[in-house]
Structure formats: structure tokens, C-alpha cells
Image (cartoon, rainbow, N blue to C red):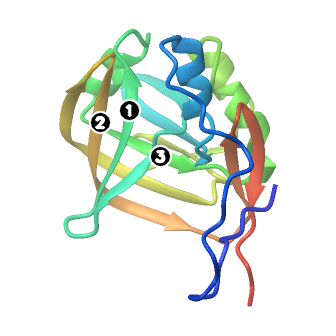
Amino acid sequence: MRLMPDVLPANAPTPVSAHAPVPPAQDPAEYRKALSCFATGVTVVTTRWQESDWGMTCNSFASVSLEPRLVLWSIRKAASSLEAFIQSGGFCVSVLSHAQQGLARQFATGDMSARFAQVPVQRQASERLRLSEAMAWFDCTLHQLVDAGDHHIVIGQVQDFGWHDAAALTFCRSQFGHFQASTS
């Protein structure tokens, strides 16, 4: 999947949908399907708590502020790793490249030892792990926790970061794809 922006000339007519709008659904499954239409990047978020490494796949990552450098992601209140992420004082976000699609699946289920099994990682000065081959990473201290429905929004202040050029792993309509930036 190659996502490219649609650019229309200023005098172009407004596109018209061939489909009539779908009425709002009350069914939670339909709501999830509607949300899945928004393509996102894919990350693995890690932390170190009580001498153990914790990690999970996450696609709710976003930038909040450039000054100070703040990022956010969200975690379900029912997540087994919630306490680790809240009590640890920080986290590291590894932005996955298209070549790391298998890691997105690996960090989505199973116990923590299975999630980290045979994954090249680097331990940061903070003691948190970052995935060695991630296309970008952000090591953060916990800045703020916001209660939001059945999730917490976790805001971190970036202490260190890095990146390299690669095709980004994307997730849309429950399928993986990729975004390759145009070189022109």
C-alpha cells in the first residue's frame, strides 16, 4: 500500500462520493470498523519495571508538542502491562518499518519473554529497551497521564531520539501496509 497525498488544482471541482453516507451505527463492532479506516503507523512501546522488560504493540502514537518535546500513546485500563507503564516513570517508543511487520504481531500477544525473544534491542541510559532496527525511536520520561474512557492517554517528554530512512509500517482496516516517502 503506497499512501500518497491527493493534490487537486485550486479550480478543480469538489469530488462527489458514489456512495451514500452510512447512518451512524450503535453497534461497537461497526464503530471499530469505522475507526479502522484511519491509517496509522505502528510502534512497539517498552518500559523497564521491577527488573523486568515490558513491551506492547501500539498504533495510537502521536506527536503533541515540539517545545517541550512531547509525544503520546494510549493504553487500555484492562491491559496486563498497565501498572508497569504507569509506575516505571517512562517508556521508549520504537517506530516500526515495513520490514518489521512480524515484530508488530510478536509484541501484540503472549508473555513478555516471548515478545522479546530473539529481538535485536539496545538498552538506553534510562534502562529501557529500544528495538535496534526501528526506523525511529523516542525515549521518554512520563510527563502526564490522562484518564480517557476505557484507556489512559500516556504523555511522555522525549529525552533522547533517533531515526533513519525506511518504508514505514502502516495499519489500516486491520491490515498491514507501508508508506514510502516520495523522493522527488
Q: 131 above or below 111?
A: below
Mark closer to the chain start, 3 or 2: 3
**Closer mark to the observer between disc 3 and disc 1:** 1
Give the quarter of the image for residue 59: top right
* Quarter of the figure with residue 22: top right
Q: Which residue is mark 2?
A: 154
Give the x, y percent position of residue 40.
58, 47
Residue drawn at 62 percent across, 26 percent down:
33
Please tell me which residue is depicted at 71% across the width and 69% down the height of the picture: 4
Q: Quadrant of the C terminus?
A: bottom right
**Mark 3 element type:** strand
Tell me the tag on residue 74.
1
**Residue type at tag 1:** Ser
Query: In this view of the protein, which residue sits in the foreground, 28 or 51?
Result: 28
- Residue 157 on image: x %, y %: 25, 53
Q: CA distance from mark 3 to mark 1?
A: 12 Å
Pointers 1 and 2 in contact (C-beta within 8 Å): yes
